[in-house]
């Protein structure tokens, strides 16, 4: 969306100049750039979303790489002696196996 991109760039300009990001200042920049088709709600939303935040820190945090999620233990880490007690099969596979639900890797819908 052109309006969202324009407001984003205006916010980056203000952050680069170390100026507090407000809806009025965003609108002033948009008007100076002759971008007139941006509804005022966009400047208000961006100003409120970025209020009290350091945009430069947000950008460097995103650029530094993905956030690490919870670590999932592998089979070797769970059982050092090689015995897999949780995943042992008795040869009777009735299709109702709890390991297929994703709960063994911490991905339950209701956690």
Image: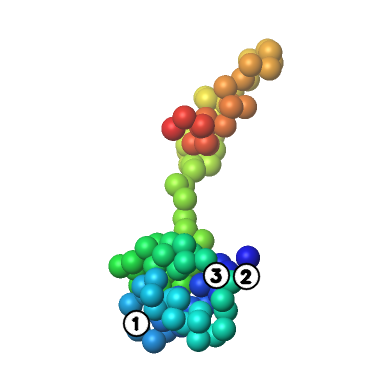
Nearer to us: label 1 or label 3 = 3
> Considering depth in this image, is 76 or 39 the residue closer to the camera?
39
Q: Secondary structure at mark 1?
A: loop
- Colour scheme of the rendered structure: rainbow
Say whether residue 22 is visible: yes
Classify the position of the N terminus by image quarter: bottom right
Q: Are marks 3 and 2 in contact (CB under 8 Å)?
A: no
Say whether residue 91 is visible: no
> Considering depth in this image, is 69 or 20 the residue closer to the camera?
20
Between the C-alphas of marks 3 and 2, the distance is: 8 Å
Q: Secondary structure at mark 3?
A: loop
Between the C-alphas of marks 1 and 3, the distance is: 21 Å
> What x and y, as percent, mark residue 16?
42, 84
Residue 2 is labelled as 2
Between the C-alphas of marks 1 and 2, the distance is: 23 Å
Classify the position of the C terminus by image quarter: top left
Which residue, given by chain and number where applicable, does mark 3 sit on?
38
> Considering depth in this image, is 80 or 44 the residue closer to the camera?
44
> What x and y, as percent, mark residue 79?
48, 35
Res. 57 image quadrant:
bottom left
Which residue, given by chain and number where applicable, does mark 1 sit on?
19
Q: Residues within 10 Å of mark 3 (few under 14, many from 20)?
A: some
- Residue 47 lies, with reference to residue 90, above or below; the image says below
Q: Residues within 10 Å of mark 1 (few under 14, many from 20)?
A: few
Labels 3 and 2: the sequence-earlier one: 2
Nearer to us: label 3 or label 2 = 3
> What x and y, as percent, mark residue 59?
46, 72
The residue shown at (36%, 73%) is 22
Query: How many labels sit on residues?
Result: 3
Q: Residues within 10 Å of mark 2 (few under 14, many from 20)?
A: few
């Amino acid at each position: 969306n052109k309006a969202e991109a324009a407001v984003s760039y205006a916010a980056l300009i203000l952050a680069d100049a170390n100026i507090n990001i407000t809806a009025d200042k965003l609108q002033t920049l948009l008007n100076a750039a002759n971008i007139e088709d941006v509804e005022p709600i966009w400047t208000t939303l961006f100003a409120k979303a970025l209020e009290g935040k350091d945009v430069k820190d947000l950008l460097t945090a995103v650029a530094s790489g993905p956030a690490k999620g919870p670590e999932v233990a592998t089979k070797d880490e769970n059982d050092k002696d090689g015995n897999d007690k949780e995943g042992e099969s008795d040869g009777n596979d009735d299709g109702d196996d709890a390991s297929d639900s994703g709960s063994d890797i911490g991905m339950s819908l209701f956690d």
